[in-house]
Image (tube, rainbow, N blue to C red):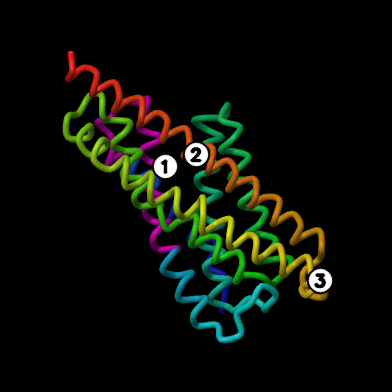
Amino acid sequence: METLFFLFLLMFFIIYLFAYFLVFRNWSPRIRPEASSCFISFFHGTPAVLLATYALFSNKARGFSSPNTPTENLVLEYSIAYFITDLLHYLVFFPQDVLFIGHHLATLFVFVTCRYLASHGAFAVLSLLILAEVTSACQNTWTLASVRRDDAEFAGKIYHLLSPPFYAFYSVVRGILGPLFVYEMFVFYVSGAADHVIPKWVWISWLVVVTSAISVSILWISNLWVQLYRERRGDLDKKVR
């Protein structure tokens, strides 16, 4: 299967421009970039989950050290193209956002080394992609509602309605399922079972990146739970008064 990376990159770039100049053209210049980023994420998150799931289940020899199949490589290229596009978005509009820029660079490192260097381990990487992106549609809807909740009543209603279930869903995936899967990765790779096909420094770096990303995600959602509690407590106090 020939590479479709450049086609995917062009596709995400066009989608971003379409969102910025047409879909959100009447939105405030302050939030148009973030909204456009959410828009291209809609075209990556759920499709990537479906494609990755299909790729994994169609590989009968799947395992933490199994060779990448053409379909798995295609999904990796799809995600690499998306993260490069979104990375450019941050470099242009939010160069001071070191956390997200670092996140995207680290994620790209994992995808690129899996696709072009190791050529093995896509089962682990795509499984993590599924766990990372399964909440994407909900998160992007929540984010769009969040940035417009102060000036659009409908957005405010969606934000308040969606926050608890989104936080709960995200907490389960990133706080429970993610760590459990990373633990399985750790046990397998530390055993040395993959050292003959995946360089040790590669799988060690994967584990470091993934563990760091999950830790930041848990901290992020914890802060949102605290913020939600304060907001609901404040609303309750206003009603009592």
Work out whether 63 lies above or below 35: below
Q: Residues within 10 Å of mark 2 (few under 14, many from 20)?
A: some
Separation of residues labelled 3 and 1 (CA atoms): 39 Å
**Residue at 23%, 40% in the rendered image:** 161
Q: Quadrant of residue 43?
A: bottom left
Where's residue 119, x and y in %?
A: 69, 72
Range of residues picked out in magenta? 20-48
Q: In this view, does 100 lie to the left or right of 142?
A: right
Q: Do the residues labelled 3 and 1 touch (CB within 8 Å)?
A: no
Q: Could you say whether the residue bearing mark 2 is in a helix, strand or loop?
A: helix
Residue at 29 percent across and 28 percent down: it is 232
Return the x and y of residue 77 as percentages of the image width and height: 56, 63
| Mark 1 residue type | Ser
- Pointers 2 and 1 in contact (C-beta within 8 Å): yes
Q: Quadrant of residue 22?
A: top left
Residue for badge 2: 89
**Residue carrying label 1:** 37
Question: Which residue is at the far bottom?
Answer: 60
Q: How many labels does the image show?
A: 3
* Callout 1: SS: helix
- Horizontally, is 150 left or right of 33 in the view? left
Which disc, if any, is residue 192? Answer: 3
